[in-house]
Image (cartoon, rainbow, N blue to C red):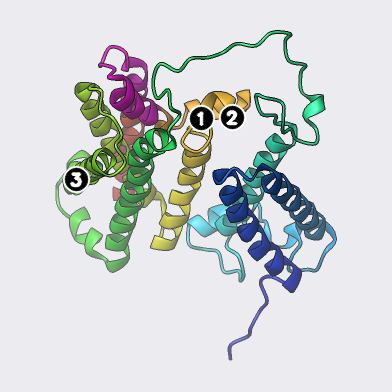
């Protein structure tokens, strides 16, 4: 006999839909230069977040954080496939908390933000440091028009490759484990590094094709300039593709099923989007966010591809980011091979 259990109550469901609508409205209002509407939308999001936090502390049993956010023991049990609870999985609950935290940080930054002209300012902008008595007029050498597509479209190469390659590899390898075909491979005398190379080589070509299509469309449809820097761009793409595939291979060695693999992938994808400089200017983020973003491989891939397409930088100028990507490949691939060897025992 099936028993129906309510996961969210009505106020929490209303909050979820309202938050999604308000975030889309905030994006639309700032895109179309409706600053007044954008400010009111931010205040509405802040109000909704305060309600959700209070409701999560004192609300109904299904909405309280204490009833669905579980500890490390539950997370480890879920990763081992031993969790038998109902409602939100341990990783799903942590995803909810991470989403609320990310939106809260973004709204908090909006409270103290102020535009360069001083016309619009957040309610708490007065708490920020007093500007100096002089101003600096910055003349952009690259992208002087400030065209948004010149910044966003090249960044799509890194973000799309991150999502597709990591998830595609993780799901494909995990599916083989679920179907039992991996057992046949484990019985052969091949070494872990040989399995990894054999499994990832076809996806390297898929990544190259994806990157080629995106760069071609960026040039033909959006008019993004290509100032040169092909050696740095190709080397960066190769390192990033191999690193992303190695990370997906590592996820597949940790996940017990495809659902776990997908959830682990999104845990990596969320900071890659928010803290890499793809959506927000990297230097405009708080110092702690810049420290975390520096450890994200997407950050360095964005610097390589934007520098190559817009500035024409070579391998020497892009060497810091290329070195970070090479280190990422080395660390993740080594851990993936070691973890795969553990599964052979």
Q: Which residue is mark 3?
A: 209
Q: Nearer the viewer, residue 239 or 156?
A: 156
Cα–Cα span, label 1 and label 2 = 6 Å
Residue located 43% across and 30% down the image: 299
Q: Residues within 10 Å of mark 2 (few under 14, many from 20)?
A: some
Q: Which residue is mark 1?
A: 293
Where is residue 259, by image quadrant?
bottom left
The local secondary structure at tag 2 comes to helix
The local secondary structure at tag 3 comes to helix
- Is residue 318 magenta-colored? yes
Q: Residues within 10 Å of mark 1 (few under 14, many from 20)?
A: many
Residue 30 tag number: none
Residue 189 vs 311, above or below: the answer is below
The local secondary structure at tag 1 comes to helix
Q: State if disc 2 and disc 1 touch (CB < 8 Å).
A: yes
Cα–Cα span, label 1 and label 3 = 27 Å
Residue 319 vs 84, above or below: the answer is above
Q: Residues within 10 Å of mark 3 (few under 14, many from 20)?
A: few
Residue 248 percent coordinates (x, y): 34, 46
Question: Which residue reaches farthest bottom?
Answer: 1
Residue located 31% across and 47% down the image: 165
Residue 333 vs 139, above or below: the answer is below
Q: Which residue is mark 2?
A: 289
Sequence-earlier tag: 1 or 3: 3
Using residue 293 as the reference point, say whether residue 103 is left or right of it.
right
Using residue 188 as the reference point, say whether residue 298 is left or right of it.
right
């Amino acid at each position: 006999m099936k028993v129906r259990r309510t996961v969210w109550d009505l106020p929490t469901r209303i909050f979820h839909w309202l938050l999604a609508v308000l975030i889309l409205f905030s994006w639309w209002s700032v895109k179309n230069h409706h600053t007044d509407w954008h400010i009111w939308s931010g205040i509405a999001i802040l109000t909704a977040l305060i309600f959700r936090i209070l409701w999560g502390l004192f609300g109904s049993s299904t909405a309280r954080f204490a009833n669905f956010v579980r500890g490390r023991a539950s997370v480890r049990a879920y990763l081992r496939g031993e969790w038998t609870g109902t409602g939100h999985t341990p990783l799903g609950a942590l995803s909810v908390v991470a989403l609320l935290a990310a939106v809260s940080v973004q709204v908090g930054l909006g409270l103290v933000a102020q535009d360069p002209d001083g016309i619009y300012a957040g309610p708490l902008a007065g708490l920020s440091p007093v500007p100096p008595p002089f101003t600096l007029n910055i003349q952009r050498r690259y992208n002087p028009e400030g065209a948004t597509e010149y910044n966003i479209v090249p960044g799509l190469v890194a973000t799309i490759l991150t999502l597709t390659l990591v998830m595609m590899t993780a799901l494909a390898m995990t599916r083989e484990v679920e179907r039992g075909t991996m057992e046949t491979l484990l019985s052969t005398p091949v070494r872990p590094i040989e399995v990894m190379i054999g499994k990832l080589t076809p996806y390297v070509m898929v990544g190259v094709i994806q990157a080629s299509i995106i760069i071609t469309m960026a040039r033909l449809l959006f008019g993004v300039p290509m100032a040169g820097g092909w050696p740095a761009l190709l080397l960066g793409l190769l390192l990033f593709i191999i690193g992303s595939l190695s990370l997906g291979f590592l996820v597949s060695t940790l996940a017990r099923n495809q659902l776990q693999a997908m959830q682990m992938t999104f845990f990596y994808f969320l900071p890659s989007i928010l803290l890499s400089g793809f959506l927000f200017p990297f230097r405009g983020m708080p110092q702690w966010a810049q420290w975390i973003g520096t450890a994200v491989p997407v950050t360095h891939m964005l610097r390589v591809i934007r520098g190559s397409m817009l500035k024409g930088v070579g391998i020497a100028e892009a060497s810091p980011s290329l070195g970070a990507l090479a280190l990422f490949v080395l660390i993740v691939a080594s851990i993936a091979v070691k973890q795969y060897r553990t599964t052979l025992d």
